[in-house]
C-alpha cells in the first residue's frame, strides 16, 4: 500500500469509522428501520433487539450489566446528564462538587452552569505530568460533597488518572464518582467495579464508531445512582433520556465496543510502538522539544509536544499533509490557550507552541515516518526563516 | 441474534418512524467516507468536514427559506423541543416566566414544560384544552396570556390524530406582546408547507427520521435574534447553543430528507390521501358485518395519511396485537413510551366517549406504501375487528 495523503493523526478529535462498524450499521439504514419504542409490532421488536444487543456489547466493554447503560447523542450529552443529573437529584443532600482543572469542556462547563445555580465546585490541581493527587481529593471532600468527576484519560496530553484510587476514596466517603472515559476506552481496560466508578461517559466516534451517539453507564447496585434527566419526553431509556433511539448509531457503538474488546491489548501495544517511534524521531532530530504530560501514565496513542519558539498555528498551516491539532477540537472556535497546559504550569507561549498527535488503529509506520519528517522539516524551516516573527507572534 | 427481518409485512406506523431513503443513506455513507474529520478541528480534514456540515446547514435552512444560522442541529426532535422550551424560559433565569402549551403536545414538550414548572420557582405553566375535534382552543390561549407569558408552544400536526392545529391564528393572538411561539413541526414535515414567518413561529422543531431521514438527528430552527440558554454545555459547537461533536452524516442525511420532503410535499399529500381513501373505503365497504367505528379527530382539519380509529366494543391492544399477528404494523398512539400501552393523553384531552378514547389505534401511511397494502390492511382490520367484537360480545 502506498502512502495516502493527507495522513490523519488527530484521533483525539475523532477516529476514522472502522469498516466493520459501517457494515454492521448498513442493515439499519435499509430494511431494519423500525422505531425501537414501537413495542407492538415486529419492526419495533427487531430494532429493539438490535439496541439490546448493542447494550450488551457495550456493557461487556466496561464490566457493567446491560441495564446500567443508556444511550445518548454523544459524550457531551452524557457528561451533562451525569453531572447535572446527580447534582439536581441529590441537591438536598449537599451542594458541593469536585472535579479536576483539566477536564473536557463538556464537564467543566456543566460544573460552571451548576455554579451559577448555587452549587460550589472544587477544581483539583494536577501535577506536572497532569495527574490528580488522590490526597488532594481526600482533603477536598466535605460532608456536603455529592459528586466527584475526574476523566479517565485526558484529551490533550493523554494522561491516565488513577481511577481505582479515586474510586476507592469516593466509595469510602459515600460520594458518587463520574468519569469521562471518552479518550481511554479504545486503549485502556476500564472496569467499573474494579475502579468503583458510578457513572461513566462513552463516545462512539472516539473508538472507531460513528458520530452522533454516545452512552452513559449509571450504576444500579451498591450504590444505586438516581439522576434527574436533562431532557423530558417519552419513556425511552428508562425515562432518563427521551428521544427516538438512534438505532443505526447505537448498533455502530455496540460493534465498535465489540471490536475494542477483541483487539485492544495488542492494538495498544502496536500503537504505543508507533507513537514511541514518532516521539524518538522528533526528540532525536530537533532541539527545544518537550513532551507534555508524563510518560508513565499516558495513552498509547498520544503525543503532545511543545516546539519552543514555533507557533503551532503556523505549523498547522504549513503541515497540510498531516492532520494534527493544537488542542481540543471543541475549543477551536474560542481560540483560548489550552486550560490543560496552563494547569500543568506551561506558559502561554509554550501552550501556543504545542502540537497534539493522535495515532489510531489504522496508523502505519510509513505514516509515522512521513509525519515525523514533515514535522521536523517544518519546525526547522519556521525556526530559520521567521524566528523573530514567530516569537513576536507568541507574545 | 436479532429477530429476523419483517419481510412481507405491511408497515403502517410512519408517524413512529419511517424507513430511511436509500439515496439518503448513500449520501450519509459518502459523507462518512469523504469527511472523517471532526468538524471542529482546524486541520484540512476538519475544515472539509466543517464545510460539509455548513453546506448541510445552509441546505436545510434554505429548504425552509431561512438563513443558515437559524439551524441548530440536535440529537433528536425531543431534544430540539426541550431546547426550545427550556432554552427560552431559562434565558433570563430568575425572572418570572409563564409558559402556555396545549394538553395534546408530544411528551417531549409536555413533560419538559411540567418539569420546568416543578423545578423552577419563577416558571408557571398553563395547559390549554382541546375540543372533541382534536383542535386546541384558541380562545383559551388568548385568555391564558399574561404579562409574564414568554412562550407559547404548539404542535402543527398532532402525532396521534393528524389534526392540524391553528398555530398561525394562535400566533396572531400573541402578536405584539413579546411572546415567542415555538412550533413542533415534527409530524408536519412533508405533509404541510413549513414557513416560519407565515406561521408566526420564532422556533420550529424538526426530526429527520419522520421523513425518511436518519434517526439520531433533529434540528431546532431559531429566528435570528432569538436568544436561547443552552441545555448541553461543553464545546462551542452550534454557535454555543448545543455542545457536542457534530453528527456530520446525520446532518447531511437530515438536510437531504428535509429538502426532499419539502419539495415533494404536494405529491406526498396526494399519495397519502389516495391511500387513506382506499383504506377507509375498504373498511366502510366491510363495515356492515362488523362493529361501528369512528375516526378520532376532525376529518376535514387533518393531514392525509394519519388515521386514529376506534371500533365500538373492541380493545385497543387487541387490535394492535391482532394486526401485528396479521402482518400489519400499526400502533396505539405514540411510540415514545416504555413498552406498555398507556392511555392516550391526546384522546383523553378530546373528551371522547370512553370506547373512542380507550379504543383508538393509529394507522399512519408513508411514501413506500402501495394501494394494494392499503386495501389488504383495511380488509384485515375489518376482519379482525369483526372477530374481536363477536368474541367480546359472546365472552
Image (cartoon, helix red, strand yellow):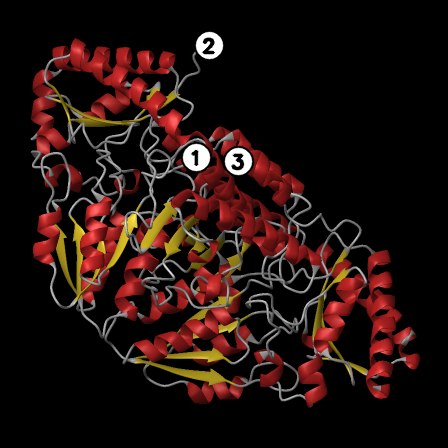
Write down the chain letter for disc 1. Answer: A
Q: Secondary structure at mark 1?
A: helix
**Label 1, label 3: how far apart the Cα atoms are:** 11 Å
- The residue wearing badge 3 is A21
Write down the chain letter for disc 3. Answer: A
Quick check: do tags 2 and 1 share a chain?
Answer: yes
x and y percentages locating residue B312 in the rendered image: 78, 85
Circles 3, 2 touching at the beta carbon (< 8 Å): no
- The residue wearing badge 2 is A2
x and y percentages locating residue A355 in the rendered image: 22, 26
- Could you tell me which quadrant the C terminus of chain B lies in? bottom right
Q: Secondary structure at mark 3?
A: helix
Quick check: do tags 1 and 3 share a chain?
Answer: yes
Badge 3 crowding class, 10 Å Cα cut-off, few under 14, some 14 to 19, many 20 or more, is many
Badge 1 crowding class, 10 Å Cα cut-off, few under 14, some 14 to 19, many 20 or more, is many
Q: Nearer the viewer, mark 1 or mark 3?
A: 1
- The residue wearing badge 1 is A260
Q: Nearer the viewer, mark 3 or mark 2?
A: 3
Total of numbered circles in the picture? 3
- Whether residue A360 can be seen here: no
x and y percentages locating residue B183 in the rendered image: 49, 68
Badge 2 crowding class, 10 Å Cα cut-off, few under 14, some 14 to 19, many 20 or more, is few
Circles 2, 1 touching at the beta carbon (< 8 Å): no
Amino acid at each position: 500500500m502506498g502512502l495516502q495523503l493527507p495522513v490523519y493523526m488527530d484521533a483525539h478529535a475523532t477516529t476514522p469509522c472502522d469498516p466493520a462498524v459501517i457494515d454492521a450499521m448498513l442493515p439499519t439504514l435499509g430494511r431494519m428501520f423500525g422505531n425501537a419504542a414501537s413495542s407492538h409490532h415486529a419492526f419495533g421488536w427487531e430494532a429493539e433487539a438490535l439496541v439490546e444487543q448493542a447494550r450488551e456489547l457495550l456493557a461487556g466493554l466496561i464490566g457493567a450489566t446491560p441495564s446500567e447503560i443508556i444511550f445518548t447523542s454523544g459524550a457531551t450529552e452524557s457528561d451533562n446528564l451525569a453531572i447535572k443529573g446527580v447534582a439536581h437529584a441529590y441537591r438536598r443532600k449537599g451542594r458541593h462538587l469536585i472535579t479536576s482543572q483539566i477536564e473536557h469542556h463538556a464537564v467543566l462547563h456543566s460544573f460552571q452552569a451548576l455554579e451559577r445555580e448555587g452549587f460550589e465546585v472544587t477544581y483539583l490541581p494536577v501535577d506536572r505530568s497532569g495527574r490528580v493527587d488522590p490526597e488532594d481529593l481526600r482533603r477536598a471532600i466535605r460532608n456536603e460533597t455529592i459528586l466527584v468527576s475526574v476523566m479517565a484519560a485526558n484529551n490533550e496530553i493523554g494522561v491516565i488518572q488513577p481511577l481505582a484510587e479515586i474510586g476507592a476514596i469516593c466509595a469510602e466517603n459515600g460520594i458518587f464518582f463520574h468519569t469521562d472515559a471518552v479518550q481511554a476506552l479504545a486503549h485502556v481496560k476500564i472496569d467499573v467495579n474494579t475502579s468503583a466508578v458510578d457513572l461513566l461517559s462513552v463516545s462512539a466516534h472516539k473508538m472507531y464508531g460513528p458520530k452522533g451517539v454516545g452512552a452513559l453507564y449509571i450504576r444500579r447496585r451498591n450504590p444505586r445512582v438516581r439522576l434527574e434527566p436533562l431532557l423530558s419526553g417519552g419513556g425511552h431509556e428508562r425515562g432518563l433520556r427521551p428521544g427516538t433511539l438512534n438505532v443505526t448509531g447505537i448498533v455502530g457503538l455496540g460493534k465498535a465496543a465489540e471490536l475494542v474488546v477483541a483487539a485492544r491489548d495488542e492494538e495498544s501495544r502496536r500503537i504505543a510502538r508507533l507513537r514511541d517511534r514518532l516521539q524518538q524521531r522528533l526528540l532525536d532530530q530537533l532541539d527545544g522539544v518537550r513532551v507534555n504530560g508524563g510518560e508513565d501514565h499516558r495513552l498509547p496513542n498520544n503525543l503532545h509536544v511543545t516546539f519552543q519558539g514555533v507557533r503551532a498555528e503556523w505549523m498547522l498551516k504549513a503541515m497540510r499533509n498531516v492532520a494534527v491539532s493544537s488542542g481540543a477540537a471543541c475549543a477551536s472556535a474560542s481560540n483560548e490557550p489550552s486550560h490543560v497546559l496552563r494547569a500543568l504550569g506551561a506558559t502561554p507561549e509554550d501552550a501556543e507552541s504545542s502540537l497534539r498527535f493522535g495515532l489510531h488503529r489504522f496508523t502505519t509506520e510509513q505514516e509515522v515516518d512521513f509525519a515525523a519528517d514533515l514535522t521536523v522539516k517544518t519546525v526547522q524551516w519556521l525556526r530559520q526563516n521567521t524566528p523573530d516573527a514567530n516569537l513576536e507572534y507568541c507574545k | 441474534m436479532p429477530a429476523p427481518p419483517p419481510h412481507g409485512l405491511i408497515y403502517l406506523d410512519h408517524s413512529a418512524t419511517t424507513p430511511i431513503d436509500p439515496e439518503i443513506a448513500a449520501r450519509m455513507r459518502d459523507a462518512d467516507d469523504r469527511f472523517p474529520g471532526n468538524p471542529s478541528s482546524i486541520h484540512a480534514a476538519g475544515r472539509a468536514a466543517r464545510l460539509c456540515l455548513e453546506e448541510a446547514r445552509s441546505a436545510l435552512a434554505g429548504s425552509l427559506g431561512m438563513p443558515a444560522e437559524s439551524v441548530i442541529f440536535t440529537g433528536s426532535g425531543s431534544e430540539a423541543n426541550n431546547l426550545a422550551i427550556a432554552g427560552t424560559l431559562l434565558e433570563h433565569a430568575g425572572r418570572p416566566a409563564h409558559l402556555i402549551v396545549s394538553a395534546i403536545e408530544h411528551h417531549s414538550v409536555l413533560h419538559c414544560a411540567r418539569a420546568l414548572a416543578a423545578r423552577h420557582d419563577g416558571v408557571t405553566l398553563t395547559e390549554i384544552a382541546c375540543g372533541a375535534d382534536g383542535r386546541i382552543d384558541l380562545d383559551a390561549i388568548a385568555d391564558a396570556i399574561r404579562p409574564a407569558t414568554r412562550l407559547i408552544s404548539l404542535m402543527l400536526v398532532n402525532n396521534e390524530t393528524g389534526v392540524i392545529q391553528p398555530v398561525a391564528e394562535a400566533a396572531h393572538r400573541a402578536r405584539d406582546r413579546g411572546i415567542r411561539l415555538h412550533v413542533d413541526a415534527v409530524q408536519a414535515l412533508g405533509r404541510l408547507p413549513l414557513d416560519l414567518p407565515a406561521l408566526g413561529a420564532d422556533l420550529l422543531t424538526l426530526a429527520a427520521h419522520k421523513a425518511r431521514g436518519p434517526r439520531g438527528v433533529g434540528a431546532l430552527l431559531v429566528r435570528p435574534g432569538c436568544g436561547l440558554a443552552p441545555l448541553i454545555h461543553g464545546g462551542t459547537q452550534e454557535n454555543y447553543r448545543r455542545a457536542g461533536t457534530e453528527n456530520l452524516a446525520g446532518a447531511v442525511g437530515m438536510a437531504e430528507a428535509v429538502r426532499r420532503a419539502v419539495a415533494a410535499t404536494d405529491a406526498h399529500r396526494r399519495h397519502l390521501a389516495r391511500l387513506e381513501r382506499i383504506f377507509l373505503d375498504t373498511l366502510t365497504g366491510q363495515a356492515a358485518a362488523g362493529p361501528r367505528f369512528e375516526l378520532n379527530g376532525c376529518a376535514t382539519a387533518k393531514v392525509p395519511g394519519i388515521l386514529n380509529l376506534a371500533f365500538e366494543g373492541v380493545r385497543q391492544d387487541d387490535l394492535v396485537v391482532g394486526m401485528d399477528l396479521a402482518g400489519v404494523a400499526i400502533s396505539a398512539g405514540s411510540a415514545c413510551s416504555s413498552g406498555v400501552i398507556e392511555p392516550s393523553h391526546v384522546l383523553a384531552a378530546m373528551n371522547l366517549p370512553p370506547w373512542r378514547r380507550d379504543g383508538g389505534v393509529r394507522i399512519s401511511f408513508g411514501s413506500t406504501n402501495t394501494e394494494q397494502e392499503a386495501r389488504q390492511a383495511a380488509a384485515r382490520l375489518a376482519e379482525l375487528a369483526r372477530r374481536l367484537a363477536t368474541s367480546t360480545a359472546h365472552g
